[in-house]
Amino acid sequence: MSEENVILVLADGSKVTLPVLGGSVGPKVIDVRKLYAQSGMFTFDPGFMSTASCKSAITYIDGDQGELLYRGYPIEQLAEKCSYLDVCYLLLNGELPDTTSSSQFKNLVSHHTMVNEQMLFFLRGFRRDAHPMAVLTGLVGAMSAFYHDSIDINNAEHRHVSAIRLIAKMPTLVALAYKYGVGQPFMYPKNHLSHAGNFLYMMFGTPCEDYIVNPVFEKALDRIFTLHADHEQNASTSTVRLCGSSGTNPFAAIAAGVACLWGPAHGGANEACLNMLNDICQKGGVSYIPTFINAIKENKDVKLMGFGHRVYKNYDPRARLMQQTCYEVLAQLDSQSDPLFQVAQALEKIALEDEYFIKRKLYPNVDFYSGIVLRALGIPTKLFTGIFALSRTVGWIAQLNEMISDEDYKIGRPRQLFVGSPRRDMDELQIPENAVH
Ligand code: SDX
């Protein structure tokens, strides 16, 4: 019996005792696993507003404080002091790497960046104007057709090999999708470059001339990867967990995460946010902001993209770091007066002072400034969510591995509140005359 319990008094006066479980930090949970057996009732929580789907030791968010911890370390410290690959090592293994482990991990990843050449033929089956996320969803799923030697999710070695392959090959796949869309030759990865530098090379290098990685862009992109690496049980991570709980292979589970991330309410918000800022700029810029804010208040379907969050009811710490990255990159480009950045900052200021947003605790989230930085780096808008997917792959893998390694895990299978027709028999008169008998 748990030290703390809640007692449910049912309509017939009977009582159900449910244990309360506490974690290391954050809200406690009521363990309802025996609720149905003891009460014949389910809990009801569409959107999982008050439901913990699992135990996890990977990432913790304090939404009220605006705090984000990866394995206990604040995102601000990791973004400043660690490379993305060191953060990948931390998320996967629970501890930061020492110097030897760090260089071994980087060496392992950089020697798995090429994809099976046959995948290029699969890629060429897409239309050139296909959305990169459609291409990426296909390519990641297709990895299970090319890497048969690491698809048993219940085999720890297979999980390790597929993790390295996914972290290493996602930048290559995103760059391939981009090059295919613009009709330029693919650029094979260069193992001597950093993770972010190699991605920039594969994106913007051409066979015609040497490509020099801009160190400011390289550092900014590496930080962007870190800021997007993991985020508790968000929609795409929950998708990966649910998909993986059937025992499917890691590539298929990650492909499901890519597909879910694409949605504008989730990872697609960075693309939607930049389109929103462009639209405001075209309609008058800062002077149009009050009209736009009114449109949001009058129409629930109009959202301030890049604002609001299910968990953060304070400023998303990633948004602050992204804004800082904006300053650094735009300064490098000597374009601090970037109109989109000006509009974004004015929009943020106005929204944060407006009762509508204050009352609903709506603050900038990770997607509000990320599009401006990515655009300044030369990344096309349609590829923004692909960068998010590239970054989040390690989080999805860490969460999937954590689930599979938990001996209590079961296939996920939610129940429902049925509101449809109770049993009824077909009336002879209703059976179509031409029905096959
Ligand atoms: C990501 O979960 C994660 O951790 C996700 C993520 C990650 O790293 O994995 O952080 C990445 O997805 C960030 C969120 C990116 N999405 C956007 O920026 C899209 C715009 N935001 C909204 O769609 C919304 O804020 C959500 C989806 C992010 C959160 O929505 P919730 O928690 O379901 O809140 P809600 O829709 O119930 O909103 C509460 C109220 C509503 O008004 P009322 O009905 O109370 O009058 O706030 C309003 C909403 O209409 N509202 C907004 C708004 N977000 C919520 N109004 C205007 N603009 C917005 N952005």
Image (cartoon, rainbow, N blue to C red):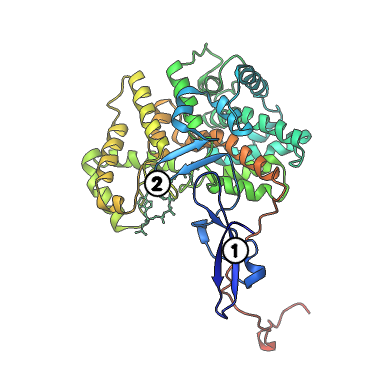
Identify the residue at horizontal 58%, vertical 48% (top origin): 238
Q: Is residue 121 left or right of residue 182?
A: right
307 relative to 69, above or below = below
Mark 2 or mark 1, which is nearer to you? 1
Which mark, by number, is residue 108?
none
Q: Is residue 434 visible?
A: yes
Q: Is residue 228 left or right of residue 164?
A: left
Q: Foreground residue, 68 or 231?
A: 68
Which structural element holds mark 2? loop
Q: Foreground residue, 27 or 405?
A: 27
Q: Kindly identify which residue carries mark 1.
A: 18
The reply to whether discs 2 and 1 touch (Cβ–Cβ < 8 Å) is no
x and y percentages locating residue 41 in the rendered image: 60, 71
Q: Foreground residue, 191 or 365?
A: 365
Query: Which residue type does callout 1 highlight?
Result: Leu
Identify the residue at horizontal 62%, vertical 17% (top origin): 103
Circle 2 residues within 10 Å: few <14, some 14–19, many ≥20: few
Q: Is residue 18 left or right of residue 151?
A: left
Q: Kindly identify which residue carries mark 2.
A: 64
Identify the residue at horizontal 46%, vertical 32% (top origin): 75
Q: Quarter of the image holding residue 321?
A: top left
Query: Which residue type does callout 2 highlight?
Result: Asp
